Image (spheres, grey):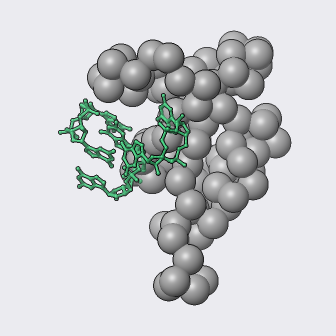
């Protein structure tokens, strides 16, 4: 990857997240709600999260960060751009 391209952010689509079934999306929804509460950031349609948070989520979902990224992209909660964020792990 080019060092001139900034690493894309991991941006969770909160509207899409709220439409997903709880059995799949529950852990991510709780994680995102915790970050929102820590920041006092309740009004957004999206939530930018730390790269480190994807590592934690991968442990929670028992997947590798890149597998989990693909899953989140297939659910529509992450943008395809997120792949580049995970490549830099
Ligand atoms: P903290 O990690 O000690 O960060 C303190 C403050 O530094 C944050 O207050 C924020 O204003 C700023 N800050 C730290 N890292 C970043 C960053 O990468 N980008 C931006 N824009 N600002 C940053 P804030 O937002 O009120 O968060 C309070 C505390 O809530 C944080 O303390 C941290 O413990 C937790 N937190 C908030 N958002 C996240 C997150 O996305 N992931 C994790 N793991 N913790 C978070
Ligand atoms: P951006 O990072 O591309 O974010 C674009 C817009 O997405 C933001 O517009 C905001 O409406 C939404 N957004 C992204 N992440 C979050 C989030 O975690 N919570 C919420 N509630 N909304 C989010 P906004 O706020 O007008 O910001 C425009 C641009 O200003 C941002 O583009 C970014 O480049 C910069 N910016 C705003 N806040 C921060 C910050 O805390 N840290 C840094 N480094 N840049 C910021
Ligand atoms: P951002 O604010 O544009 O920050 C981009 C990257 O700069 C962060 O990637 C992190 O590597 C570094 N960075 C920015 N501020 C700080 C800081 O205060 N302390 C440290 N140690 N590093 C900092 P990262 O961690 O992957 O975060 C991605 C995005 O997630 C941030 O983009 C911001 O939009 C959001 N974010 C992360 N943590 C916090 C937080 O604590 N509070 C808020 N409000 N937003 C956060």
Q: Is 78 placed left or right of 43 in the picture?
A: right
Establish if 9 lies above or below 28.
Answer: below
Q: Tell me the quarter of the picture where residue 2 sits.
A: bottom right
Q: Tell me the quarter of the picture where residue 22 sits.
A: top right
For the question of whether residue 49 can be seen, the reply is yes
Q: Nearer the viewer, residue 53 or 46?
A: 46
Q: Which residue is located at x 42 percent, y 47 percent?
A: 50
Establish if 36 lies above or below 54.
Answer: above
Q: Which residue is located at x 58 percent, y 31 percent?
A: 46
Establish if 18 lies above or below 57.
Answer: above
Establish if 27 lies above or below 84.
Answer: above
Q: Nearer the viewer, residue 5 or 18?
A: 5
Expressed as whole percent of the image width and height from the top left, the position of residue 25 reads 67, 23
Q: Tell me the quarter of the picture where residue 86 sits.
A: bottom right
Q: Which residue extends farthest right? A: 74
Q: Nearer the viewer, residue 34 or 71?
A: 34
For the question of whether residue 55 can be seen, the reply is no
Expressed as whole percent of the image width and height from the top left, the position of residue 72 reads 71, 41
Expressed as whole percent of the image width and height from the top left, the position of residue 35 reads 39, 27
Q: Is 38 placed left or right of 52 in the picture?
A: left
Q: How many marks?
A: 0
Expressed as whole percent of the image width and height from the top left, the position of residue 60 reads 51, 35
Q: Which residue is located at x 46 percent, y 41 percent?
A: 49
Q: Nearer the viewer, residue 11 or 20?
A: 11
Q: Which residue is located at x 60 percent, y 83 percent?
A: 1
Q: Is 43 placed left or right of 34 in the picture?
A: right
């Amino acid at each position: 990857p080019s060092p001139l391209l900034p690493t894309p952010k991991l941006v969770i689509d909160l509207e899409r997240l709220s439409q997903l079934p709880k059995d799949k999306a529950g852990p991510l929804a709780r994680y995102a709600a915790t970050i929102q509460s820590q920041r006092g950031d309740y009004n957004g349609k999206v939530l930018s999260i730390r790269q480190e948070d994807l590592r934690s989520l991968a442990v929670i979902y028992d997947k590798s960060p890149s597998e989990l990224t693909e899953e989140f992209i297939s659910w529509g909660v992450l943008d395809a751009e997120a792949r580049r964020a995970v490549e830099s792990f």
